[in-house]
Image (tube, grey):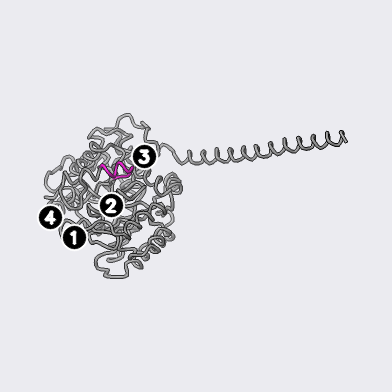
Amino acid sequence: MKVKKIIIAFITIFLLHNFTCFTSGCAEKKEDKQVKNDSAEQKLNNSKMDSTINKFTDLEKDAFKLHYDAIVIDTHNDILMPVMLNGADITRETKSTQSDLVKWKKGGLDVQIFSIYIPEKIKSDDFNYAIKLIDYLDKLQSEYPDELYMAKNYKELIKRINDGKFCGLMGAEGGNIIEGSMDNLETIYSRGVKYLGLTWNTSNAIGVSAKDETQRGKKGGLTEFGIEVVKKMNELGMMIDVSHLGETAFWDVVNTSKDPIIASHSCVYTLSPLYRNLKDDQIKAIAESGGIICVNFYSRFLDPNANTRQINAIHKKYKSALKPLEEKYGDDLIGFNEERYQYLTENYTDRGVPIDVLIDHIDYIVKLVGIDYVGLGSDFDGGISTPNELYDATCYPVITKKLVERGYSEQDIRKILGLNFLRVFKRVCG
């Protein structure tokens, strides 16, 4: 009997020992898997993702090299409007649009967020029109896989950027798109729309717009449905865009959202007191949320006294004079930008709206809340006139050169051009 008890005890100890080894082995395997995952993530975070890098020792000399080395992201572009309404061809360089796949490449852009916007000409059926725009981008990607990749999440986006792909994301402009339906909100999210601008110039079931509040005397902020939309967007992992939103509704968002807030294409009210621009306390609130203000290129938002006729004349002059340079340099984008910038400097005019005014808006935000909360949201092809030196999407490098001249460091410039937005995108959308 004693022998039997000893044998049973021995077997029990043996089994317990092996069970412990088995479970610890599983833990080791899980740990190994985590290490591999971390390693894979680290591979994504190459030098382009490192905001602490000092790759260029002479920024005055290497400003354009820095630009093409950095990740450059534009958070708002309306190119789908001329495509759908006028048949513009996004796949080739055209005179009729400010941007296209060719211009984006020449301008060193890595990521374009396409605006899913319902033009005023479309009087009804907003949701179905939005789906048509999404379908168009899907079709464009399938037909031109080497020129465009529509990313679904942060990790995928970074991988494709590192592979040298031009990437697209989608952001909806105007809550009228969901037609008062939470199901429609979930549908556009499932189709890849990463942010929703709660209003355009007109109010909707979500809330009151900035234009209605300031110019039409409409009272109110977010509706009860609007409050639920904000909460649902937090739940889904969808960025809340407050560009175009009324001030009362803005503060309703601040008091409701648990996630960082973005302004995808807005400027500074203090510098240009227009209804669409953000006041200091709004800028501070966006920064406190961990969000970002992406500066709009629209000349009237940058300077309320902008003269569109003057700007158009300046653009015509610049484009005509610089065309031979494009042909001269071909794929040598650094050489082209160096000579183009020399021409722009020698032919500087303070008529129209100089690009320095755009940099003033960036400077203001940085000095008010810090370097981590500002980016670029051009609003190209939204029917806007742009600063003199930003006549189309080939001109993003001029911004980098101007930032260098203002004394911004390499790390700070990388943040402004794209890393600040990526931080918010990763945190909210995953």
Q: Position of residue 301 (x, y in %)?
A: 18, 50
Asked if the stretch drawn in magenta spans residue 287, the answer is yes
Asked if the stretch drawn in magenta spans residue 147, the answer is no
The part of the chain drawn in magenta is 284-292
Decide which of 198, 37 is in the foreground and name it: 198
Residue where numbered disc 4 is placed: 309
User: Please, what secondary structure does the residue beneath circle 2 have?
Assistant: helix
Residue where numbered disc 3 is placed: 69
If you read the primary sequence from the N terminus, does the residue marked by circle 2 or circle 3 appear first? 3
Q: Are marks 4 and 1 in contact (CB under 8 Å)?
A: no
- In three-dimensional space, the C-alpha distance between marks 4 and 1, rounded to whole angstroms, equals 33 Å
- In three-dimensional space, the C-alpha distance between marks 3 and 4, rounded to whole angstroms, equals 35 Å
- In three-dimensional space, the C-alpha distance between marks 2 and 4, rounded to whole angstroms, equals 39 Å
Residue where numbered disc 1 is placed: 218
If you read the primary sequence from the N terminus, does the residue marked by circle 3 or circle 4 appear first? 3
Decide which of 296, 333 is in the foreground and name it: 296
- In three-dimensional space, the C-alpha distance between marks 2 and 3, rounded to whole angstroms, equals 39 Å
If you read the primary sequence from the N terminus, does the residue marked by circle 1 or circle 2 appear first? 1
